[in-house]
Structure formats: C-alpha cells, structure tokens
Amino acid sequence: MFKVTINVDPKKDILDPQGKTVQHALLNLGFLHTEQVRIGKHIVIQLQVDSKEEAHAMGVKMCQDLLANPLTEEYSVEVEPC
Amino acid sequence: MNSQLLKELNLDPHDYQEIVRRLKKEPKIVELGLFSAMWSEHCSYRSSKKYLSQLYTKGDQVIEGPGENAGVVKLTDSQYLTFKVESHNHPSAVEPFQGAATGVGGIIRDIFTMGARPIAGMDSLHFDYPNSARSRFLLNGVVEGISFYGNCVGVPTIGGETHFASCYDENPLVNAMVVGILDKANLRRSIAKTPGAKVIYLGAKTGRDGLHGASFASGVLDEDRKQRKGSVQVGDPFLEKLLIEATLEIIQEDLVEAIQDMGAAGITSSSVEMAGKGELGIRIDLDKVPRREPGITPIEIMLSESQERMLLIAKQGKESQIKEILGKWELDYAEIGIITETGCIEIFTGETCHCNVPIQLLLDPPENTTKPIRNPRIKTLVSNVPNCVPVEQTEAVLLQQIKNPNFGSKHWIHDQYDSTLFAGTVEKPGLGPSCIHIHGTDQYVGMALLSRGELCSIDPYEGAKTVCAIAARRITSLGLTPTAITNCLNFGDPTQEHTMWEFSESIKGMNDALSVLKAPVVSGNVSFYNEGEKQRIYPTPVIGMIGTGSLPNKPTLYFPQSGLICAVVGKTKKEYIQTDSIPRIDILLEKKTQDIIRQFILESTISSCISIDRGGLWYALVKSMLPKHIGLHIYKIFQEFTPGSYLLSESNSRYLIAFPSDHLDRIQNHLHGIAPLDIIGKTIENRFIIEGVMDLAISTIKEWHHQSLTQYFE
Amino acid sequence: MLKVGVVIFPGSNCDLDAIRAVETVMNVKAVPLWHQDNTIDTDAVILPGGFSYGDYLRPGAIASHSPIMQAVKIYASNGGPVIGICNGFQILTESGLLPGTLLRNTTTRFISRDVSLLVTSNQTPFTKGFAVGQKVTFPIAHKDGNYQADPSTLQTLQENNQIVFQYVENPNGSLHDIAGISNKERNVVGLMPHPERALSDWTRTSDGVPLFQSLLSHLEAHV
C-alpha cells in the first residue's frame, strides 16, 4: 500500500483570482510581508499496488486524465509507503 | 520579414505586402502585431462589413445603432436600454469553463461601458448530442462557467436556448446576450474628443493571457490552432463586479469623455478604436501599464487579452476624482497615455518608440472579396421531423419527442443560474421568452434569444426570416411590442464562396423580416471560421430580440386554470422540416397576427398565450400544461391530419391561446379575414386527453420531459 | 425616523434588492453601510446576499474580518436586530454570530429555484408576522447552503427554538432541513432563501412581504 500525495496548483503564468483576493485580505489584516498567494488543491490517495514506481506512474496518469486541467493547472506527485 | 513571425501572428503574406505598400516602409514588430490584430476578421469585419451596412437599423426608438460597444434604445423619456449578444465559440471549444465564463464577462463589460447597469442575461448554446462524451464535457463546462461567472458578478441569467446537432461536434457555439438599463444622462460612447486628455487603465494587471485571441478566432479550429496560443484567459467575476460599480460611479459623476473595455486584441483595439472614432491620435507609455509577470514584451502587452480591464479617457482635471473612486473599490489606477492630434498610435517604453502608424490605416483593412456563390454539392444533414404519425403510435412518438434533449426540459441548466436576482424576473426560464419588470416604472422588458440553424442550413434566406418572426412571436406572446434586435452571426470559413452565400442570404432574410416587424438591428457580432477539420456548422444566425411595453395583467404563457376554451390561432398546414424544404413564412401575415394577439392580451380577452414554433403545437402544449398541471381535453377532429401530425406541424404565424367561452365571439370577430381560429378542446385538471387516442397524466408527461438532460448527467 | 442599514461588501450583489425591500415594503429609509465603516447608527441591519470577495477561500470568510463586522458584533450584543440573507447568513456563521456552518450543496452544483419553507419560529423580530407551521415560498440561489452543526449545537438550537425556517423538500443536504436559524437571544437571524425577492405575485410570490412588515412593527414597538 502506498500513499500518493498530489498537489494541483494554478500554473505560474495563469491568473489566480482567488490567490490574489486572499493576498489582498491578508495585507488588510496586517500581514504586510505577504508577497504572493497561490491556492491549489491537496489530494491524498491510497493505492494498493506493488511498487513505488507503479504508484507514482498511476498518480501522474490520474492528474493527466482527471485531477488536473492541463491548460490551467500544474501538479506534483509524491509517494510514500503506508 | 521572416515567415515564422507572420505565421505566429496569423498574418496573410498578401496582407503583409499591403501593409508595407501603405506604410512605405518595413513595419516594426509591434506595428505588425497591431496590424495582425486590427486586420483580423474578428476585429475588422473585413468579410462582413459590406453586408452589415445593408442591415435595417433605423427607427424612432433607436438611440445608438451598430458600431458602439452595444446598441441603445429608448425605454421611457428618462431611461434607455442597452443590449448586445456576443460569441465566445473558439475559447469555449478549448477550455469550456473559462471560455464561457470570460464570454459572459466580456459581454457584461460591453454593457456597463455604455453607462448602464447590466440587469439580465441569456445564452444561446449549441453542442453535439449529449450521448457523446466530449459533448457532455463541453456542455457541463460551459454551463458551470456561465453559472460561476454570472451568479458571482450579479447578473441574473433568465433564459436562452440550448440545441444539439452533430455539426457542432468540433465547434460548439457559446453566445451570450446581456441587457442593461441606464439613465439618459449617463450614456457614454467610445469616441475620444480632446487632445491632451489622459488615458487611464483600470482593472486587472496584464499577463500573457489569450495572446492573439483575435486572430485565434479568425481561423478554422484545427489541432494546430488549439495548441498555438498563450496561456488560457481566466475570468475573475469578483473583480468585474468591482469594475461595474467603480465604472458606473465614475460615469455618474461625469468624469470621463470616452470609455471602452479591453476585449479582443486588448489595449490595441480599445485605444485604436477610441482615438480612431474621434479622428485623433494616441500615445501610450508601456512602462506605465500594470503587469502581472516580469519579462512580458511590448508586443505581448499590446496583444494580451487579460480579462477585466477597461480603458477610459478622463475629462481634463477629473483625474484625481477618478483615482479616488477607484481607490474606494480597491482598484489600481494607471495613467498610461494621452490623446494626441497626430492621428497616429505611438507606443513607447522610455525613449524607445515601438510603433508609430496612422490609426486610419489600422481601421481600413483590404476587404475580403470572396463572391457569395452557392455550392449545391454542400448538403446538410438534417434529421426529418416525423410528419406522418400513425394514430396508434401517437403517444409513443409524442413522449419520445419531449425526452429528446432538443425538446425536453432544460431545468438541469437553468437551475444552475441565478435567475431571480434583482427581484424583477416575471417567469422562470424554460418557457421561451423571458420577461423582467423595470422597478419604479410600469414597463416590462421581454427578451427572446434564439436560432434555427437546421432551417438556415436548408434555406438561409427563409430560415433567417423565420428566426426573426419567431422572436417577435414570442415577444408578442408576453403582450409586448418588438423594439429592436441584436444578432450573433455564426458561420463557417468566409474565404469559401458557399459560406458567403449563406451569409448574404441570411442578411437578406433578416432584413425582409425586420423591416416589416419594425425591429431594427442595433448591435451584433459576426463569428466566422466555425469549422473543425471534419465538418462545418449549420449557418447559425442567433437573434436576440427585446420587446417593451406596459402590461395591465401579468403575462401568462401557460394555462392558468381548467374550464377554458383552447384554440390555435393561424392555419395549420402539412409543413415539416424536410431535407430540401422548410415551412414557409408570410411575414405580413405574421405581423398582422401579432398585432391582433397583442391586443387580445392587453384587453384581457385571452387568459393565456404562447407562440407555436419549434416542435409545433405539441411543444407549445407541453409548456402550457406543466407549470400548473392544467391539461387539455382535445375533442376536435383533425381533418386530413392524424393527431400526431397535426401536433407536430411547424406552420408559422400560429399561437396557442386559452380563453373563457364568453369571449369566443369577440375573438372570432377580430380574427375574421386574417387568421383562422381552430378550437381544439378545453383545459382540464391534471390530464392530457385526445378523445379516443390517448389519455395521460400530466405528471407522466412531466417525468418524460424532465429526463431530457438528467438522463445524461445524473 | 426609523433607518435600516444594508451592509455593502465588495462583491455584495443583493444590496439593491434589500434596499428596495426596506423602502417599498417598510417605507423606511435604507442606509448603505460600507464594509470599512466601524460604527452603526441604524435601527436594524441587513447583511445582503451576493459573493463578498468572490466567495474566495470560503464564502463569508474574508468579509467576516472587515471593520463593519466588528461593529455588527457589538451592535448585535446590544440587542440590535440583524438579518443575514444567503451570503449574509454565511458571513454570520463565519463571524461566530450564529452557530454552525454552510457547506457545499450535496448536489455540488449551484441551485436556483423556488422552494417551499415551513416557518418554525415566530419569536424573532423578522418572523413575528408569520404563523408557526405556515408554509411560504421563497427563491433560493446558492452553491453553499448546506447547513451543518455538531449534534450538541443542533440540540441547543432545537431546545431553544432557534430554528426559524425549514425546507419542506431539502434541496441542499442541510442538517434537519434547516433553512434559517436565530441566535439564542433571537435578535440575529440568518437564512439561505431570499425573502427580498418574494415581494410581488407578478414576480411569482409575495410571501416575503410579512418578513419586512414584522421588522417594521417590531421597530415601531421597540424604538
């Protein structure tokens, strides 16, 4: 069993209206050092497969097929045994 | 000049030679970028201009016709309405959620730019049948995009249409219409007036979003085009809401002399058009333009299509007041340039000049000279409507018909749109026309947005004429008078003679209908190149009509109670959609019938009224029966028709009406010599009965109707 | 002269409807309260619907930290009548003025339709004019209207008769069909449906009129 941790974030060159609005709110609340806010999704999946490589490949495929929008989002996949 | 750059800019080599000839020099890169955008089909209307100039556009009610950000008509002595429909087809084909969302954002900006508060929207959507996975992906994304943007920005979406046909497989259509209301004094135009006036940029920062969007929309949608673009445009409805409030406040305080949103081709088109209309020049300092990312180049800034941006020209001395209002709404303020007397657009970073060309050259591209010639080999595949329904199959055919996604309930879509904001929406979406009350007045505004691509593909002239007639028929069924229209003309590749034939025939058809119906065109949009690699769409002119008037009673499209006489006004003939012919339309008869029906409604002679159009009497009946579960007992003998073929006839200029029996004489007298009155039965509680043929509970009909989309999505 | 304050946050979009309801039904002056204001001098406060700050992060989260909400907290603790409609309800739960929270609808989609509601308490300044058990129809228009609270909170709500409106047919998955609640003192009410859009039979239903009339008679009796 492997735990696959996936982070899906807006691509760097894409506008992130939510991140921008939250940054503004943090500045208003006095967090004056807030340079940038980007808001993405954190997805944890448990996979019953044999190897770490297999789990990783499956995580990447899941991102490509469903979890991430390739036009607007980028993703990272991390795997650890569990 | 290297051909790679021309390709990237989607600039035709002939155009390039023409640019060099007119400038009498090699253009700089930024100059070339400006030409590529301004001469694109999307911005320049180079294929359609000469046809559009023939459109019927005049009328006492018209304050502002085509050419402005949106058309303006008179509502009362002190208030105007402004409205327009626009397409966002290609972006929606690539990224349906953001494509549709930014489409809604764009049309809303066109409306508040005129000084109006946007009060209602509608959408016309066309996809392949939802049994295709890609079609479901597109429909789901587009509806979510409209829902996300429209609901958040605060413009109720009160109706529209969704059609399915396989020709929209590669190239779906997403057209959005918005209506706004304004006080007479707040009308603003996009014409620069005063040399020396400051040019102010407001709204979102500029990124590499949707680079070359204008030229993207000016070519056939193939794999290459889908890949070749900047980053996807992302809509921010919250920022747009702030822009609406700030802009309306700035206009209310009379601080600007001209204003335009940055739509296709961004800063380029807004600055060129405002200065060009005033026959003035403009100088822009790119260092002052707020940007989202480092390293963005001058040509990228000029062509960026980042959303939620406006350009305004300040009245002199009012700059600080503008800045103050923007500050209140937490919006950035940047003075990026100045209006000049040169007649040229000059673009600088520091001391470096990137561009200095006469604006009138940018606004005057060579015309597309493709001749409009019919190619008889181009056949359209239209599925025939059942026209000879055997008596024993009546029930099965009728039920199947309303489960078809083209005719069944669209509640799955409408339920995702806020349709009741502003508390003026008279009816829920889904009955055909929509209607809103203008608070503080006795005025009602009806809206009808529709198309009949399948008719236009068989006969673009008669088809376009029919679409206009139906729009007016629907407005009339509310008791209102057609005021004006906006159109979104969705066609194929304009370099093909057949496309231009379809286009010119449609324009003629619209003109012949609108001049009789007294509904001039006040705004619109042309979308060419709606073709994939495999197929072309039906020629699909979409008509958005508004009607206005005061009403003594709440308009009732559906049966209000049992015990009323139910009748069809107008002659029902054996007319159906066939591969080579469509139902005929007599526009003079259409107009005469409309005038009588309107009088019936205003004098409360009839209790309910709905237009019979797409799907025939059967579809009109379904819409009349479901809202209050009031059904109908049909006892009429259908003469030469079987019941099914009578109910599915698509003859034009007909209405389904219900009225108390003591009004019968009056109705017959008024219709005498103009249109026949076919009494078909009496309204009853809860059932739909055709004597001796079928007997169904309304709840059964509702169940079938309800499944049309949910069968694919839930 | 009575005055009712209508709070405007960046992104509020039902503010005009709330103002119109106050002015036409109650015939009382409506005063816009700006999110940056930190004092309130009106006789009641309405937090209207919309998408304050775009509903980014969580609906109502950013608005609940604005200066006006600090003022609303003091105002409410002094017994001032406060009603939050739709996004206003979300802001009230985010700021802790009402218990529980509003999650994404179980359908995961935005829902816009007319719903039938049961009035379950007429002990608040906003519902005095209704009968308990009365059915009313208001439109809903939200994506995050699924009311949830822990079991002890629900028990408290029930014991103190703080549930004000219940859905006849639950559209969004709300716990116990809850459409609206009040605080223990009953001066703060939040609901997801829109009474301010239900003021005329021409626009489908006028069932919202008694809500504003209730507030008027409450203010006339107490101010």
Image (cartoon, rainbow, N blue to C red):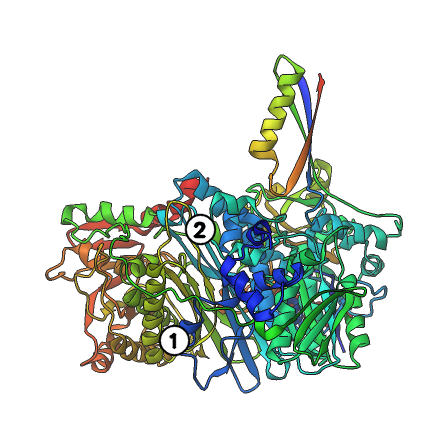
Q: Residue at x 35, y 79 (%)?
A: B515
Mark 1 vs mark 2, CA separation in Å: 34 Å
Q: Amino acid at mark 2?
A: Pro
- The image quadrant of residue C37 is bottom right
Name the element at disc 2.
loop
| Image quarter hosting the N terminus of chain C | bottom right
Residue, disc 2 = B172
**Which is nearer the N-term, disc 1 or disc 2?**
2
Residue, disc 1 = B479
Q: Is residue C192 left or right of residue C64?
A: left
Residue B676 or B513: which is nearer the viewer? Answer: B513
Image spot of residue B28 (x, y percent):
66, 61
The chain containing the residue under callout 2 comes to: B
- The image quadrant of residue B153 is bottom right
Q: Same subunit under labels 1 and 2? A: yes
> Is residue C169 in sight in this rendering?
no
Residue B492 or C129: which is nearer the viewer? Answer: B492
Name the element at disc 1.
loop
Q: Is residue B504 left or right of residue C187?
A: left
